[in-house]
Image: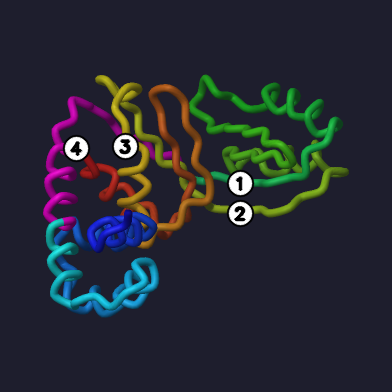
Amino acid sequence: METISSCVKRIIDKKPFLIESMTRGIVSYGNLSDMIGAEIEASLGKPIKHSAVVMALRRYGEELRERSAANQVLQIQYELLMKTNIYDLNLVKTTTLLEKIKRIYHFVSLERGDFLNITVGNNEVSIAISSKYKDQLHELIADEQILHRLDDMVALTVIFSGDFLHTPGVIYEAVRKLSWNNINVYEIVSTINELTFVIERTDSINAYEVLQSFL
């Protein structure tokens, strides 16, 4: 059986920015009650008191702040690595493209610090590569269908140590912080101990500062 409290939690949990606002204590519970009151009444099938919704919101806000404080105690260390001049390309996945991808490793010097990440999805292939190889890459994939391309991008990599693998919520926290600061992420690449975001150069300094302090 639904109650005002359960309705409040269900509604808030579907809206990440409301969770963030309530966790930071920067939302007006009175105004928020006005916004979600009709939805709660529809769920319960009866009129409700404005004060009851405000009380439920206040209690859930305290719960969110306690949960956030507990999550801050993470025994994780990390360092940041920034790579500039990244070219990001998305293509339709084909058998011929998969064969050509093997040749990319022949001209990219990973041992010299060049950047290369290839993600193969169900229908698409994403290639993020150092911009100096842009012409060579286009020669290689000349007959393939390009869906989207982005030049002058930056790759920010968070390299974790500590118990990152078994600590839930770390990736979410990083993405949440970037989103809160209006930083658009074009690619996310994850390995066991590394998390890479491909973003626009204009966002790079802000994103670096955000990720530097997100834990």
Task: Bin the neighbour count of mark 4 within 10 Å (Cα to Cα): few under 14, some 14-19, many 20 and up.
Answer: some
Q: Are marks 2 and 1 in contact (CB under 8 Å)?
A: yes
Dot 4: element: helix
Q: Which mark is residue 169?
A: 3
Tell me residue 205's x, y (percent).
33, 53
Quadrant hosting residue 167:
top left
Q: Going from the N terminus, do you reach mark 4 or mark 3 first?
A: 4
Dot 2: element: strand
Q: Are marks 4 and 3 in contact (CB under 8 Å)?
A: yes
In the rendered view, does 25 fall on the left or right side of 167?
A: left
Q: Are marks 2 and 3 in contact (CB under 8 Å)?
A: no
Q: Which mark is residue 88?
A: 1
The residues tagged by marks 1 and 3 sit, at their Cα atoms, a distance apart of: 27 Å
Q: Going from the N terminus, do you reach mark 2 or mark 4 first?
A: 4
- Amino acid on which the number 4 mark rests in the picture: Asn
Tell me residue 95's x, y (percent).
85, 31
The residues tagged by marks 2 and 3 sit, at their Cα atoms, a distance apart of: 29 Å
Tell me residue 184's x, y (percent).
45, 57
Of residues 52 and 78, the one nearer the viewer is 52
Dot 3: element: loop
The residues tagged by marks 2 and 1 sit, at their Cα atoms, a distance apart of: 5 Å
Q: Going from the N terminus, do you reach mark 1 or mark 4 first?
A: 4
Q: Going from the N terminus, do you reach mark 2 or mark 3 first?
A: 2
The residues colored magenta run 60-83
Q: Which mark is residue 150?
A: 2
Q: Which mark is residue 71?
A: 4
Residue 180 in sight here: no
Of residues 24 and 56, the one nearer the viewer is 56
- Amino acid on which the number 3 mark rests in the picture: Gly
Q: Is 61 a magenta residue?
A: yes
